[in-house]
Image (cartoon, rainbow, N blue to C red):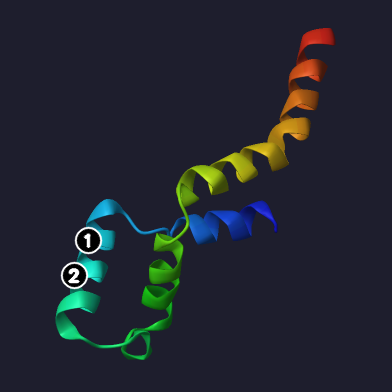
Amino acid sequence: MTPEQIKGILRFVPTDEERTALASYLCNSGSSLSALCECEKFMVSMMSVQHAKHKLQALLFMQGFHSNLEEIRKGKFE
């Protein structure tokens, strides 16, 4: 995945408030996932991934690490 794709996914990782609201909606309404829109379905599936936000942020960091390191090295030795 590209850094832009990871940033896009990060926007749809549910917050604690969104997790609570989605869980409450699914339990209380008795409706299935088919009643939700695509982004809400994605949020529900991301709720099962432990520490999803941290994992995506780590992946984003790792992708940019070498280029950032090279920039630092060039700045130090020039």
Q: Which residue is found at the position 15% from the left and 78% from the top?
A: 28
Across and down, in percent, residue 71 comes to: 76, 25
Q: Is 33 in front, or is 37?
A: 33
Q: Position of residue 16 (x, y in %)?
A: 27, 52
Label 2 residue SS: helix
36 displayed left or right of 72: left
60, 41: nearer the viewer: 41
Q: Is residue 69 above or below residue 27?
A: above
Residue found at x 28% / y 61%: 19
67 lies left or right of 7: right
- Can residue 32 be seen here? yes
* Count of marks placed on residues: 2
Residue 58 appears in which quarter of the rendering? top right
Q: Place residue 47 in its image quadrant.
A: bottom left
Q: Which residue is mark 1?
A: 20
Q: Is residue 54 above or below residue 7?
A: above
- What amino acid is found at the position of numbered circle 2 in the picture? Ser
- Crowdedness near tag 2: few (<14), some (14–19) or many (≥20) residues, C-alpha within 10 Å: few
Whether 73 is drawn above or below 7: the answer is: above
Direction top: furthest residue: 77
Residue under circle 2? 24
Residue at disc 1, secondary structure: helix
Marks 2 & 1, CB-CB < 8 Å contact:
yes
Quadrant where the N terminus is found in the figure: bottom right
33 to the left or right of 77:
left
Q: Residues within 10 Å of mark 1 (few under 14, many from 20)?
A: few
Q: Can you see residue 12?
A: no
Q: Residue at x 65, y 52 (%)?
A: 3
* Viewer-side residue, 74 vs 38: 38
Label 1 sits on what residue type?
Thr
| Whole-percent x, y for residue 69 in the image | 75, 24
